[in-house]
Amino acid sequence: MKALINKTLLLLGLFLTVGCAAYAQTSKKQDPKKITKAMEWNKLTKEEEDVIVRKGTEYPGTGTLLNNKEKGTYVCRRCNAPLYNSESKFDSHCGWPSFDDEIKGAVVRIPDADGSRTEIVCANCKAHLGHVFIGEGFTAKNTRSCVNSVSMSFVPDKK
């Protein structure tokens, strides 16, 4: 009799676990307009993938957008979401494009596990962009987003 009760309790526990897991999966509904499918993302080169997906860093001073002075918008290389306006770009002499402000809601800041730096990613597709530093005094906004050129594309303003 005790073995039958144990088996019944085990089956009941298993049923409740599976039922709760199924409910949890079905109760999380996301707005389809906010979901970006990987198949809609731009194809990346190996170098871009190393930085954007695997959170690497391009060599300082080598990025194609480092010395860009044109007016326009910097967009995510993976999903084309607008990230930075050219007006917020400044020369910090750090070896990567630097911005003191992002387009509202375009970038997410994630503290590194060790607390030493803060990673920045595209809010739309979570592509790794670089790191943000606060309190260095380079600009009046006291912010330096240090962004890998390969994480972005540049769209010039129409003339």
Image (cartoon, rainbow, N blue to C red):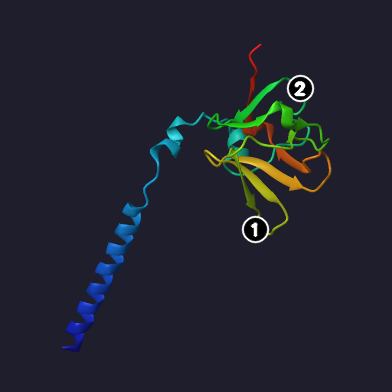
Q: Is residue 47 left or right of residue 34?
A: right
Residue 120 or residue 128, whichever sits in front: 120
Helix, strand or loop under label 1: loop
> Mark 1 or mark 2, which is nearer the start of the sequence?
2
Outermost residue toward the top in this view: 159
Helix, strand or loop under label 2: loop
Residue 88 marker: none
The picture places residue 27, in percent across and down from the top left corner, at: 33, 54
Q: Which residue is mark 2?
A: 69
Residues packed near mark 2 inside 10 Å, few (<14), some (14 to 19) or many (20 plus): few
Residues packed near mark 1 inside 10 Å, few (<14), some (14 to 19) or many (20 plus): few
The picture places residue 99, in percent across and down from the top left corner, at: 73, 35
Residue at 64% in and 44% down = 120
Type of amino acid at the residue the image marks with label 1: Ala
**Image quarter in which the N terminus is found:** bottom left
The picture places residue 33, in percent across and down from the top left corner, at: 42, 36
Residue at 33% in and 61% down = 21
Residue at 25% in and 76% down = 10
Residue at 63% in and 30% down = 152
Residue 70 or residue 77, whichever sits in front: 70
Alpha carbons under labels 2 and 1: distance apart: 35 Å
**Image quarter in which the C terminus is found:** top right
Q: Is residue 84 left or right of residue 45?
A: right
- Front of the two marks 2 and 1: 2
Residue 113 marker: 1
